[in-house]
Amino acid sequence: MTFRMSKASKASLVVTLIFAALAAISLFTVEPEPDRFFAGQPPFDLEGHQGARGLYPGNTLSGFRAALALGVTTLGMDLAMTGDGEIVVHEGLRLSPARTRGPDGAWLEPPGPALLALDLAALAAYDVGRLRPDSEAAARWPEQRGLDGAAIPTLDAAIALAEEVSGGRIRYAFAAGLTPIDPEISADPQVFAAALVAAIRAAGIVERSTVRSFDWRLLAAVHQIAPEIRRIFPTSEAAGFDTVDRGKPGASPWTAGLDVDDYDASVPRLVAAAGGRLWAPRVQDLREGDLAEARRLGLRVVVWTVNEPEIMADLLDRQVAGIVTDYPDRLRAVMGERGMALPPAYE
């Protein structure tokens, strides 16, 4: 027996199958963040990198206080985890010989101990208030003032200072230091994310916080625990530190399993595929068309680390959403020349 369908029945079946296919596809489509994701965000974000690293010791309480006095929209700070699970404000997973003196006052020898090998009490004995005079860092930031006796602060202490000085108004950019390359000296992303989210929630600063990490596994873990916390997806294509691996086989170890070449080698598309709405490229890596593509994808772009006034001016003309700088005073001057609103200074 042969079953025949009328033309009307065939048309109805086709329409039904199309809607069924669309419904199936939607099950595997990640919904973009709603517009409220950007609610309350400043029109332009002046982020003081490590406080004001070009002028004062980075990631120290004195440096943060100085940055707040200069006036920044966002206080940027690097984070690492100690062996006893405490989050401290420190750049890098090892103590840097270029800026660290031991309890005896002597400069550390390379490579410096891993923070995961030290507990909080041991870490308190080190002084990070001055750059080693013969170091590359001292040549890079010649205006940085030394402040002897500066300890590595805990995250809680840094937040408490900033909240007191700003009256609970300053914004935060927390840069979590992890690496998929050397797991022996890097905290577990899930453990770090849980501790960081707990600290942000306990301080009552969820709406004024963003979390970033070159290791996007941390960003995925934060989103899983606390989807209400904004994330910034940073990228670097520097010769010695390439987190994108454009044109190389397989996914970069930094991008949580995503391969940029699956997205036509477009970093903005890679960030969007990861669920990001904030992209932080290294300024030297910005390609022609990147900003336009990022805007088409609904991304805001915050560029790092920009210290030259002429580059700041160019980026402002291109209407980036924010700039990370070691010299907040320079960026404020460029903004002032353009009649832009300046963030308040907190004495």
Image (cartoon, rainbow, N blue to C red):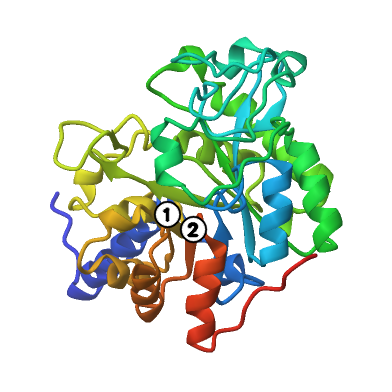
Q: For the point 38% across and 56% down, which residue is it? A: 272
Image: 7 above or below 62 = below
Q: Which residue is mark 1?
A: 305
**Which circle marks residue 221 in the picture?**
none
Q: For the point 60% across and 46% down, which residue is it? A: 145
Q: Residue 247 is drawn in which quadrant?
A: top left
Lower sequence index among marks 1 and 2: 1
Assign a secondary structure to mark 2: strand
The residues bearing labels 1 and 2 have C-alpha atoms spaced at a distance of 5 Å
x and y percentages locating residue 204 in the rendered image:
82, 51
Q: Which residue is mark 2?
A: 325
- Judge from the rendering whether residue 81 lies leftward or rightward of residue 61; answer left or right: left
Q: Nearer the viewer, residue 58 or 187?
A: 58
Callout 2, which amino acid? Thr
Visible in this render: residue 171?
A: no
- Judge from the rendering whether residue 344 lies leftward or rightward of residue 177; answer left or right: right
Q: Residue 341 is drawn in which quadrant?
A: bottom right
Callout 1, which amino acid? Thr
- Judge from the rendering whether residue 265 lies leftward or rightward of residue 292; answer left or right: left
x and y percentages locating residue 201 in the rendered image:
78, 45
Assign the C terminus to one quadrant of the image: bottom right
x and y percentages locating residue 17 in the rendered image:
30, 60
Q: Nearer the viewer, residue 240 or 289?
A: 240
